[in-house]
Amino acid sequence: MMRIDVATLFPEMCQRVLDESILGRAARKGLIETHCHQIRDYTLNRQRQVDDYPYGGGCGMVMYAQPIYDCCVDVLRQAQEQGRPRPRIVFLTAAGKPYTEQEAKRLAQYDGLLLVCGHYEGMDERVIEEIADEEISIGDYVLTGGELAALVVADSVLRLQPGVLAEPQGYQEESHWNGLLEYPQYTRPEEWRGRRVPEVLLSGHHGRIDQWRAEQSLERTRQRRPDLYEAHKQEGKEKS
């Protein structure tokens, strides 16, 4: 059973998301485990202050290294007391490496993850150097904090755990699993606002349906993500 911990200034917000829907049901069944930790609880000052002005000047505030570090160390202690391996520590930062489905598959192989959320103008670099195993960015844009990024990573990793989804096909045919975008999906009614479900999907002929879906997946990728399309073609050439 995988355990994911989130170190954050907004643990209640993060835990509410993780306790809902598919992930919440999986946690209640004992298939996964999630915990959110308040970084502010690890401050050493009376004001519970977690940030200060940056050295060298500039706008905004920077988070102290000490409370982040002590929070991480406490999570490592908890994992050890559970008899678990040390969780992989991932800092969510705008300077991290790009996050993809392939990265989600890789992280899903760990027994546990500790996702650390920055805030304000970022975190003192020394705590990243001291304890982080890696930094991840979910996209080429900046958020007000790392909480949404951590939830994206947690969701994409936990859904790959055994039993979380009804069957592996639930994610193996989705966009990015095999490097392509997913084919179009339809449900009832057969006609809506003059638009009909493609006849092949009503045929009951599974071979033709599979072929149609493969063609649609390839064409959609070619139109919308030429970078993925070219990479897929190149991979096909290397295998042939």
Image (cartoon, helix red, strand yellow):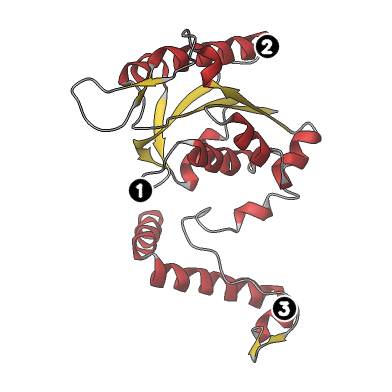
Q: Is residue 199 left or right of residue 100?
A: right
Q: Which residue is mark 3?
A: 205
**In the rendering, which numbered label is found on residue 188?**
none
Q: Residue furthest bottom?
A: 194
Quadrant of res 186: bottom right
- Disc 2 residue type (three-letter): Gly
The secondary structure type at the circle numbered 3 is loop
**Quarter of the image with the C terminus in it:** bottom left
The CA span between labels 2 and 3 is 51 Å
- Disc 1 residue type (three-letter): Tyr
On the image, the x and y values in percent for residue 213 come to 58, 72
Name above or below for residue 233 compared with residue 170: below
**In the rendering, which numbered label is found on residue 141?**
1
Answer whether residue 98 is visible to the viewer in this image: yes
Looking at the image, tell me whether mark 2 or mark 3 is earlier in sequence order. Answer: 2
**Rendered residue at 33%/27% (across/down):** 61
Q: Which residue is mark 2?
A: 83
Foreground residue, 7 or 233? Answer: 7
The secondary structure type at the circle numbered 1 is loop
Q: Residue furthest left?
A: 56
Q: Residue furthest right?
A: 29
- Disc 3 residue type (three-letter): His
Name above or below for residue 74 compared with residue 215: above
